[in-house]
Image: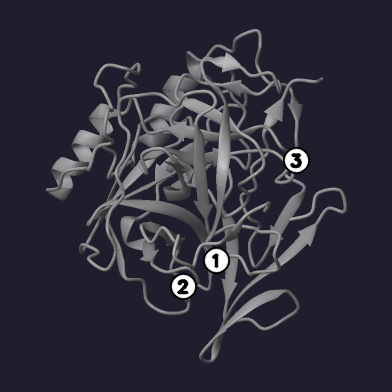
Amino acid sequence: MWVASLLMGVASAGCATEVADQTVETRVTTSPTNPTIFGGAKDDDGQAVAGVVALRVGTGTTFELCSGALIAPNVVLTARHCVTKNATTSVSCDENGRSANGPHVTANEEPSSVGVYLGSSPSFAKPPVTIARAIVAPTGPYLCDSDIALVVLETPITEVAPLAVRTHTPARKGETIRSIGYGQNDQSSPIGTRFRKTGVAVLAQGKAVSPSKTPLGPHEFEVGMSICQGDSGGPAISEETGAVIGVVSRGGGCAEDFGHIYTTTSGFDEMFADAFDLAGAKPKGEEGDVAGAAPSLQTRSSAESADAAAEAEAASAGCSIGPRTSSNAGGTGLAVLAAAVAFLGARRRRSR
């Protein structure tokens, strides 16, 4: 899981952005063998993708940062772990989309705690443009193969145009995407600055264990070096069509050129239908996207998830792990430290 924790209103050593009389700050410790993105560029010029937004999750002085994509004036696409109360700091899965380390989430965050920010360098000390009204996501306690969610907004965003989305066709090995998010970068810009990387190739599409020994569920695909902490929920945008085809789920060391995992936007028909019915909107589909091209993962809306803990207990009793489950823990190589410990993605992979 790749959210980053930020601390607001504190002045001390670290990377900080001054806003009026307040400071939004993160303190970052970097491994000497894993410098911080990672071949990207600031997304603030003529090629900027304004429909990529930042999500502030939490209303206190410490909050979590994620990325997302506006796919209707009042619907944002993001990762499920960005908008849930998480039971673990790492996610380990096999190629069947089953958990290798137990339940991952318990319940959704309170929708009103999820704020949406626009622009390439938003001020998180200011009020959000709008907040969430409901969270629609797959149910159950696991993030494997289903780390995706839709946030229905309280008020529509009219300042930027929504992005098209692929809902039926899986990612194709070799197709290239544009990775965009507000996370860590290699250009000394603070977390919360929107970066993009173009020409990122899809290395493998699940159901598979990829050549890099990365297990991928049927609704997951792998890319190389591009994304990092804070990019969770950020979109993979097809360079051919401009449509969103996936959301950032998890990964290993940010400088590693393999093992970074997106959840596909295809195969979640029921979730999209529930969210857009609730929003009273329609998604803009990708041209050429054909219904029935991907296996459907049955989901239902989860705007309220108080019973998630009971579901977790029942589901874990029937969980079996396949023989090719990941085993060795691969650290992120980055620790984002603030008033609370960040949820850092630890991709678990097989030994080489």
Residue beneath disc 1: 192
Q: Which residue corresponds to the image point at 50% horizontal and 71% vertical from the top-left? A: 121
Residue beneath disc 2: 122
In the image, residue 224 above or below residue 168: below
* Quadrant of the frame with the C terminus: top right
Mark 2–mark 1 CB contact (< 8 Å):
yes
Mark 2–mark 3 CB contact (< 8 Å):
no
Residue 265 lies, in percent from the top left, at 37, 33
**Residue type at the position of mark 1:** Gly
Q: Nearer the viewer, residue 180 or 252?
A: 180
Q: Which mark is residue 340?
A: none
Q: Nearer the viewer, mark 3 or mark 1?
A: 1
Most distant residue in the right direction: 32
Compared across the picture, whether 255 is left or right of 314 comes to right
Q: Secondary structure at mark 2?
A: loop
Q: Nearer the viewer, mark 2 or mark 3?
A: 2
Q: Secondary structure at mark 3?
A: loop
Q: Which residue corresponds to the image point at 50% horizontal and 40% vertical from the top-left? A: 177
**Residue type at the position of mark 2:** Pro
| Gap in angstroms between the C-alphas marked 2 and 1 | 7 Å
**Residue type at the position of mark 3:** Gly
| Gap in angstroms between the C-alphas marked 3 and 1 | 22 Å
